Amino acid sequence: MDTGELIYLSSRLFLGALASFFAIMVWSKTRDAVWMLMVMGTLAAYIENVYVILDLFGISWEKTPLTGSAPLSLILLPGLANVFFIAAFLVMVIRKRRKTGPVKVPGPPPPAIQF
């Protein structure tokens, strides 16, 4: 492993750990569904980073179920964070839609009254 790969992996772990730390701090301060889903997405992204790095070093679970020739965990983990982020954004859109109501499309202007 050369220096560039080592810097890449260590920065990925450090920044992911920092994001996860602050996500857990937000988790303890709020009970809002949107923020909870964002926190879970951040933690899922960090878990995926750690798993990929452990797999790169050869430290992985031997009993991982396979889908074809790829481990199921390497198929599911990268998308898991995005699923949580999509759910968070969807909840926010639904909330905003309920507050404002349906979008009103303006019709043609009323006819002018002539005297």
Image (cartoon, rainbow, N blue to C red):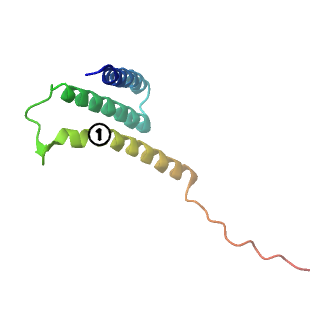
Residue type at tag 1: Pro
Residue 110 located left or right of residue 58: right
**How dense is the environment of label 1, judged by Cα within 10 Å: few (below 14), some, or many (20 and up)?**
some
Residue 115 located left or right of residue 93: right
Residue 32 located left or right of residue 59: right
Q: Position of residue 28 (x, y in %)?
A: 39, 23
Q: Give the residue pinned by disc 1.
A: 78
Q: Nearer the viewer, residue 17 or 97?
A: 17
Q: SS for tag 1?
A: helix
User: Does 43 sit above or below residue 85?
Assistant: above
User: Does 4 sit above or below residue 72?
Assistant: above
Quarter occupied by residue 52 = top left
User: Does 83 sit above or below residue 55?
Assistant: below
Q: Work out which residue is located at the far right of the displayed protein and give it.
A: 115
Q: Residue at x 67, y 70 (%)?
A: 107
Q: Nearer the viewer, residue 96 or 16?
A: 16
Q: Position of residue 94 (x, y in %)?
A: 47, 50
Q: Position of residue 108 (x, y in %)?
A: 70, 73
Q: Position of residue 47 (x, y in %)?
A: 28, 30
Q: Quadrant of the C terminus?
A: bottom right
